[in-house]
Image (cartoon, helix red, strand yellow):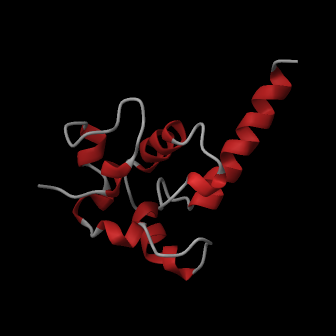
Amino acid sequence: MITSPLNTIPIQRKPTLGDTWVQQAACATVDPEIFFPKTTRYDSSYDKARAICQQCPVKDNCLKAALMAEESLTAYGRHGMFGGMSPDERSNLANQRSRIGTKGRR
């Protein structure tokens, strides 16, 4: 069985090992602990995970899945490296997208 940090995403339709892109993820055969360092802030703990993500052929799909999963979460509810981004980076990206979306609807 393949272990992946993607198995921890609580989304409407969680990616499964049956999804083609999940099977192609660079993290699929790596220890998931690498993607969930025991830190609350970005530091060098994420460097190894980031290096794996940067070479992943499905990094964009992973980031989209993480952003969808975390749609209603605050920065404190986000954990782990997904799509090459730390929790803080994904939170900042989600906030930017939210502001742009709000401006576009006025």
Q: Residue at x 43, y 67 (%)?
A: 36
- Residue 38 place in picture, x, y as percent: 47, 75
Residue at position x 50%, y 79% in the image: 45
Q: Quadrant of residue 103?
A: top right
Asked if 78 appears above or below 71 in the picture, the reply is below
Which residue occupies the foreground of this view, 94 or 72? 72
Which corner quadrant holds the C terminus?
A: top right
Image point (36%, 30%), residue name? 13
Q: Quadrant of the N terminus?
A: bottom left
Residue furthest to the right: 106
- Residue 98 lies left or right of residue 6; in this view the side is right
- Residue 74 lies left or right of residue 31; in this view the side is right
Q: Position of residue 57 (x, y in %)?
A: 37, 51
Q: Residue furthest top?
A: 106
Q: Is residue 61 above or below residue 3?
A: above
Q: Which residue is outermost to the left? A: 1
Counting labels gives: 0
In this image, 70 relative to 51: left or right? right
Vertical placement of residue 17 versus 45, above or below: above
Query: What is the x, y in percent for residue 63?
Result: 49, 46
Residue 14 image position (x, y, % from top left): 34, 37
Q: At 43% from the left edge and 69% from the top edge, which residue is drawn?
A: 49
